[in-house]
Image (cartoon, rainbow, N blue to C red):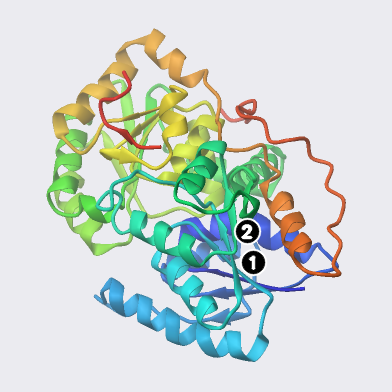
Amino acid sequence: MKVLSVFGTRPEAIKMAPLVNALARTQAVESRVCVTGQHRSMLDDVLSALEIRADYDLDVMRPNQGLSEVFARILAGLDPILAAWNPDFVLVQGDTATSTAAAMAAFYRHTRVGHVEAGLRTGDMTSPWPEEGNRRLTAVVASRHYAPTPRARAALLAEGYPGSNIQVTGNTVIDALLQTVAVLDREGPLKRSIEAEFSWIDPNKRLVLVTGHRRESFGTGFQNICRALRILGSRRDIQIVFPVHLNPNVRDAVFPLLGDVAGIRLIEPLDYPRFVALMARAHLILTDSGGIQEEAPALRKPVLVMRDTSERPEAIEAGVARLVGTDSADIVAGVSALLDDPALYAAMANGASPFGDGHASERIVADLLDQIQGVTAEPFAAPPLPAFPTPLSISSNGNVRKGHFQ
């Protein structure tokens, strides 16, 4: 069975790495990887850190190009690869231009598509934009939908997709997180190197980790986020650390507004093991990332989400994440409440992640093998996916909108 995994952004690479490795360990599968380069330098860092080798690299990014150009380059670049190798399945992940363009390229070649992390919905085509649209378009041409949660499966069923084509697998990001936590817990050069690199973190202050990159927040949204961080940066009891995304729309807002704030440390994007280590050190996380909404609860870290909607409502309903939007006053109020109310903090930190048990990749591989006539799925001994797996430990020093859950 020939399987081509296609991804192009840093989050996609992190979430696909465990699946790529699981495919590589499966004797009945010939696995190849195609990267699009949608996040060039950040993608390369992840591939190096997770030891993933690309068989094909489309290298689509050009300065200042728009989404239509990215989509067209991926579609045109992938077609000759599909024609020459003729895989049985193309696997795509999530909600990017890469996932949708690759799915369409496969569809045009009559190649089956497996959609990893399928079924996430906000019900609002403008938020997140363009991700909500990308997910819906990818679903239309997918043959197999790998839903991370029962709620994601229910969303696909409500849209008319046959239940026989949908598998609840958990999210592969929990696979990646578990594997990384195990590595970070081992004594050795990596652990010592990371501890040395983060020696500037003040152990006497609570660490607030911030990330941001959403397109719908470009402009006014990021300016409001930065204004909130300036206010929070005046607190003497916290240290704010912000790995700044490479997108110029983010950097052009962040550095001028926050570069002179003593309580804020702006750093370059981190590779995945170092970012997991930083999440583990954090007291709370302020983000607009979808993946971090899944990872942080597994590390018992409260998450405040700088968006008005979330396609991951399970975390909000479980009480481990809250929507604060991009209004400066709401962000300040949300962070301050967690810093100043121990009971509120404990309630969020003691919840559990509803996004998986670390065996999503094996479930996907087993299902793929079941789809090919004459190929028998290898035995898989993992238990049925629990609704709320136990949160991870690490040794280190549906439509939901903002305001619906208090």
Q: Nearer the viewer, residue 378 or 42?
A: 378
Q: Is residue 199 visible?
A: no
Q: Quadrant of the N terminus?
A: bottom right
Q: Which mark is residue 17?
A: 2
Who comes first in sequence, dot 2 or dot 1? 2
What residue is drawn where x is 29% and y is 71%?
Answer: 67
What residue is drawn where x is 33% and y is 18%?
Answer: 339
The reply to whether the C-beta atoms of the residues labelled 2 and 1 are less than 8 Å apart is: yes
Question: Residue at the top extreme?
Answer: 343
Q: Nearer the viewer, residue 50 or 127?
A: 127
Give the left or right position of residue 364, taking residue 219 as reference: right
Say if 383 sits above or below 158 in the image: above
Residue type at mark 1 is: Ile
Residue type at mark 2 is: Ala
Q: Nearer the viewer, residue 119 or 78?
A: 119
Q: Position of residue 393 (x, y in %)?
A: 63, 28
User: Image quadrant of residue 61?
Assistant: bottom left
What residue is drawn where x is 51% and y is 46%?
Answer: 157
Dot 1 falls on a residue whose secondary structure is loop
Q: Residues within 10 Å of mark 1 (few under 14, many from 20)?
A: some
The residue to which callout 1 is attached is 52
Give the left or right position of residue 290, taking residue 221 as reference: right
Q: Position of residue 40 (x, y in %)?
A: 43, 71
Dot 2 falls on a residue whose secondary structure is helix
Say if 182 sits above or below 67 in the image: above
Q: CA distance from mark 2 to mark 1?
A: 7 Å
Q: Residues within 10 Å of mark 2 (few under 14, many from 20)?
A: many
User: Image quadrant of residue 365?
Assistant: bottom right
Give the left or right position of residue 10, taking residue 133 as reference: right
Q: Is residue 313 visible?
A: yes
Q: Position of residue 31 (x, y in %)?
A: 72, 72
Say if 162 sits above or below 341 in the image: below
